Image: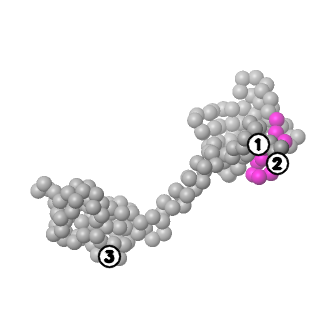
Amino acid sequence: MKLLHSTKNYTLTGEKKVNVQIRDGKLHKINNRKAAFEIELIENDEYVIKVNEKSHLGQVVSLKQNEVTVMVNGNTYNFTVETELGSKRKEKLTKDAGKKVSKTTAPLPGEIVAVLVTEGQEVHKGEPVMILEAMKMQNEIISPINGKIKALHVKSEETVMKDQALFDVDPGK
């Protein structure tokens, strides 16, 4: 008969990243290496922490949601506790954030009265790319990021609907 273990993986992110595995409510591995770990409350927020037979004096200084500050042997450490899934999601979003093409859509229905750029042209964040006339008002449609115009989906004098694709900007990173 095989015993089922409850295992959770966390990432502590501070000055350096540490992977921690908790099995059946107890610390099992640190950075994929088995760890003999004991913790004993002395008083208030002070603890004696034994990791692989070495003792350390520790104290929880601050604990707000997943942001933690501890003092161990007189040294202060700040870190964020993330679940394995949350950590992977954050890494993917950070990695992909600079690569994605930014797609700009029409904020309201109207007519494009001027296209101020051409495909392949460099643009800066906040720079006008098109002029959209709606309800007799002219609205600048600006570039949301620095990059090159990858595609123009509309032309001057073309009527557009709300949320219709106008242009794409490639950050080129």
Residue, far left? 136
Residue shown at 18%/68% (left/top)? Answer: 158
Q: Does the magenta segment cover residue 37?
A: yes
Q: Secondary structure at mark 2?
A: strand
**Of callouts 1 and 3, the N-terminal one:** 1
Residue labelled with disc 3: 119
Tag nearer the camera, 2 or 1: 1
Place of residue 164 in the rendered image (x, y in percent of width and height, measured from the top left): 27, 61
**163 with respect to 148 (left or right):** left
Tell me if residue 62 comes above or below residue 90 in the rendering: above
Of the residues shown, which amino acid type is indicated by label 3?
Answer: Glu
| Residue 5 shows in this picture | yes
Q: From mark 2 to mark 3, how far is it between C-alphas?
A: 56 Å
The residue shown at (68%, 41%) is 77
Can you tell which quarter of the image residue 129 is in?
bottom left
User: Magenta span covers which residues?
Assistant: 28-38
The residue under the point 66% across, 32% down is 61
In terms of sequence position, does the residue under pointer 2 or pointer 1 come before the other? 1
